[in-house]
Image (cartoon, rainbow, N blue to C red):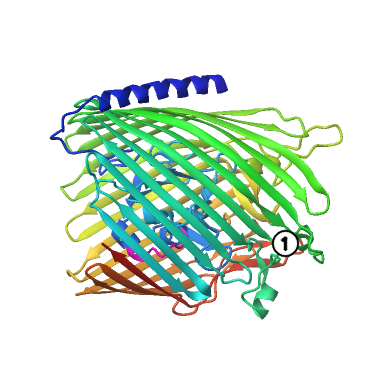
Amino acid sequence: MKRNFLALMAGLLCSLFANAQDSLSQQKDSSRTLREVVVTYQAGKTTPVTWQNINMKMLEEKNTGQEPTFLLSATPSITVYSDAGNQQGYSYYRLRGMDQTRINTTLDGMPLNEPEDQGAYFSNYPDILNSVSQLQIQRGAGTSKNGAASYAGSLQLFSPQLSDSAKTTIGAGYGAYNSFRIFGEYNSGIKNRKALYVRASQIYTDGYKYHAFNNSQSIFISGGLFYDKSTWKVNVMAGHQQNGMAWLPVADSLIAKDKRTNANTKAEKDQFFQGLVQLQNVWQPALHSTITSSLYYTFLKGGYGFDVNNFSGLPTDGNLFHYNFRSHFGGFFSNYTLTYNRFKWISGIHGNIYTRQHRGTDDLLGELYKNDGYKNDLSAFSKIEYYLHRFTLYADMQYRYTSFDYKGSVAFPQMNWHFLNPKAGVSFAIDRYTSLYYSIGKTGREPTRNDIFGGNDDLSADSIGKPFIYNRDPESVTDQELGIRINSRRLAFQVNGYYMDFKNEIVLNGQLGPNGLLLTNKVSRSFRTGLELYADYQLTPAFSLTNNSSFNYSRIKEQTATFSPVLTPALIINQEAVYHYRHWLLAVSGRYQGRSYIDFANEATIKAYVLVNARLQYSLQRYIISFFINNISNTEYYNNGSVVADGSVKYFVQAPRNMYVAFKYSF
């Protein structure tokens, strides 16, 4: 497998350099518009899947360097919580009740999910949304993607538009819990066929919980070369973060005494560095043909301290166990696009190799174990959109192969999975503003390393040396989507229904494993169904209303029992009103999140709550000053929790009323 992968990599490199020589040999200026690197995984206007493009202007106005999950939570079917209780540091989100290990995340088509645990962690790339030019969310199976399975859905990020006008921006902000952000951003625009973008950020917070600080830095560099038939682009992104840990839920009895209680000890900290580099090329060999290719590499190094006594409920003695990680992740993809008036056909291949070293050490005993995980991924897809009068017919087929191997003190048989993921759909344009669509798609997904090892970082074995394998079986979902879209001058509207039928779904059971990570169970039968609404209405030139809401009805059937999956509220409503007057902008948003459960027995609950936030913005020429007030009503609420062995309940408390002020200057 590795030899085949390296051969493919070498072949792609030769192709890329051949294209480079062809491009560099062209000396004449072209009258055609210079093109950015394009990615072919986005859903288009008529693609019959459930998708939503985020309003980037509004996102920029709301962005203060908080974790992206809080900004995403204003879209349908998303829930979010943070370890520290405020909006910086580690935070997590779920889509249709499924966690982010089941959400495919890419940057210009490059996978951002870590292959072993399949999660994408924005905290390792602080302030990443400050350098994103487009953002599309697809809910459900969607279109074929690179990397981790697009199971609950996908989040597609796109790097800065180098063709934008030359501009420099500096910004700063300060707010509750000693939280601040400082950043600088420069875009040269295209000059003599070249362009450069650079952004650097510093973010800090003490955290709402005690000793739950976050201190992080990041940089994003993007450069491009633009030729007649070829465009080259390089992205470099790196982030460094240090955190006071707060990942343990807190007993409700302790929260009643002091809401800022942190169940982790002050000595427990983490530190991670992650960086990536991506080389992209778009080559147009003929009028109707485009070839998009990319090479990428990601490096991660870091770890965290774990107070075992504190986790076990024993008096702490200051001794820590340390989980340390180092990973290398490299890959490529190449897509061919053929476009005519009546159809668009795209085919592509993708492959990557991944290795991650795990090392466990103790302050007193030294190194206790060392092991390595290896994961390879190879996929190919072909999809077509055919336009027949008012109809758009869509078909998409992906084959994906992935393997996981392990080298440690216990012998491990390599695991291999093969997935065939078909998708099809149709959309019908009722008139120039309104369209209907229906799609059906199947996606398979392998278990994570944590699922396979039952929460252990070092594989354990029985008395005869046989490894304890908790789950090796893949899960799959058949997703059906039916919706209507309206896009007129004053109204953008989409409502869709979905039905997701699962086989061997891997779901959270509300418990924590021996290393503090969330544990899962495999269930034989389950489904998720619901309605989702997005509506943006411009009542007057100065006043607009935006609603993002969802209703979810989901059930798990296990033997004779039927129950709701954890952390899946039935009803979520997001409503925002925005008013512009000259240089002023006032926005008020409200969120209602219904009750959800945190255990399989459906006995421990997270209560429903209402949040109200507001922002006031003043813009004058090159200056923007913004004032934010979050949780105006000072609501006491939780967004996650767990049930311990003795039946007591622990929660993740979220911050009360808090404020933040931000300033930006562009020139």
Q: Is residue 92 above or below residue 224?
A: below
Identify the magenta region: 61-67
Q: Label 1 amino acid?
A: Val
The single residue placed furthest to the left in the displayed view is 31
Residue hosting label 1: 644
Q: Is residue 253 magenta?
A: no
**Residue at (31, 40) in percent of width and height:** 224
Question: Relative to residue 73, is residue 45 drawn left or right?
Answer: left
Question: Relative to residue 589, is residue 315 drawn left or right?
Answer: right
What is the x, y in percent for residue 51? Answer: 34, 48
Q: Quadrant of residue 271?
A: bottom right
In the rendered view of the protein, which quadrant contains the C terminus? bottom left
Of residue 302 and residue 342, the one placed in the foreground of this image is: 302
Of residue 630 and residue 131, the one placed in the foreground of this image is: 131
Question: Relative to residue 363, is residue 657 drawn left or right?
Answer: left
**Residue at (27, 56) in percent of width and height:** 167
How busy is the neighbourhood of tag 1: few (under 14 within 10 Å), some, or many (20 plus)?
few
